[in-house]
């Protein structure tokens, strides 16, 4: 697959997906707080291992995993049009096209260097498929979608050439969001709900059939 062809395919990856009806607001009253510290491309948390990679190849690996995660969000998170995962993702592809194309070239070059020109192509395809699958989430979908939406907005604001820096700052957060997180500080508390006290009805108010005697019935 050529870089030009990749650009075309990536740009249309979610263009045909219509916005579905969904939530009328963001997903949480208070966004969950996921662990977020800078991360290097060589960190195992980023994604699949690419042993023997150069610093430039690790940077491409980091960027490619961020793009893959946002792509999965564009596909998974359309239940809430307010997250704007589809238009934001397509905007990222356009705004950061040069940096993404360079990362693609570097990363495919790694697999061809390590596995050879023929096996390298298949190895990259397998790497891409597993990378996408590793972002799939069900139980943690709300937290993942909210986090991916926030990151995609930051990516659109990042200057051209600055997407890799953003990946280094936010990739750990995106991976952490794949662990379920409920509504912070809004757990159900039955003791916070006022329930009226029902007075006990004496035993002599019931007849043999279990019916309430007239003398104990409340007046109209």
Image (cartoon, grey):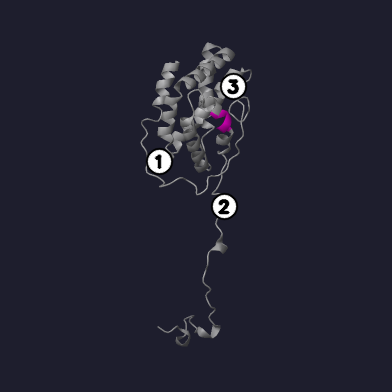
In the foreground, 26 or 188: 26
Quarter of the picture containing the C terminus is: bottom left
Tell me if 155 is positioned left or right of 87 in this view.
right
Local secondary structure at mark 1: helix
Q: CA distance from mark 3 to mark 1?
A: 33 Å
Q: Give the mark nearer the N terminus: 1 vs 2.
A: 1
Quarter of the picture containing the N terminus is: top left
Callout 1 touching callout 2 (CB < 8 Å): no
Picture quadrant of residue 62: top right
Residue 23: x %, y % from top left = 41, 46
Local secondary structure at mark 3: helix
Residue 216: x %, y % from top left = 48, 85
* Residue 122 counted in the magenta span: no
Q: Residue at x 53, y 11 (%)?
A: 117
Residue matched to label 2: 185
Tell me where the magenta segment starts and ends, as one range: 166-171
Q: Give the mark nearer the N terminus: 3 vs 1.
A: 3
Residue matched to label 1: 81
Local secondary structure at mark 2: loop
Residue 170: x %, y % from top left = 56, 33
Picture quadrant of residue 92: top left
Q: Residue at x 37, y 43 (%)?
A: 21
Residue matched to label 3: 58
In the rendered image, the vertical position of residue 42 relative to residue 154, given as above or below: above
Q: Residue at x 49, y 37 (%)?
A: 150
Give the main secondary structure of the magenta stretch.
helix
In the foreground, 16 or 59: 59
In the foreground, 25 or 145: 25
Question: How crowded is the residue under tag 2: few (<14 C-alpha within 10 Å), some, or many (20+)?
Answer: few
Callout 3 touching callout 1 (CB < 8 Å): no
Residue 87: x %, y % from top left = 40, 33
């Amino acid at each position: 697959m050529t870089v030009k062809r990749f650009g075309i395919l990536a740009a249309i990856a979610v263009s045909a997906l219509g916005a579905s009806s969904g939530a009328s607001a963001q997903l949480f009253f208070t966004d969950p707080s996921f662990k977020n510290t800078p991360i290097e491309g060589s960190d195992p948390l980023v994604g699949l291992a690419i042993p023997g990679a150069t610093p430039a190849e690790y940077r491409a690996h980091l960027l490619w995993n961020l793009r893959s995660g946002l792509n999965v969000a564009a596909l998974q998170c359309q239940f809430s049009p307010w997250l704007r995962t589809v238009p934001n993702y397509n905007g990222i592809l356009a705004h950061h096209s040069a940096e993404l194309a360079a990362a693609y070239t570097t990363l495919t070059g790694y697999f061809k260097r390590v596995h050879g020109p023929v096996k390298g192509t298949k190895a990259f395809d397998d790497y891409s498929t597993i990378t996408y699958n590793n972002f799939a989430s069900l139980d943690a979908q709300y937290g993942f979608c909210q986090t991916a939406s926030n990151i995609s907005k930051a990516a659109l604001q990042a200057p051209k050439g600055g997407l890799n820096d953003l990946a280094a700052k936010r990739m750990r957060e995106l991976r952490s969001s794949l662990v379920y997180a409920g509504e912070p500080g809004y757990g159900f508390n039955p003791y916070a709900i006022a329930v009226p006290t029902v007075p006990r009805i004496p035993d002599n108010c019931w007849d043999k059939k279990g019916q309430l005697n007239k003398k104990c019935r409340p007046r109209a």
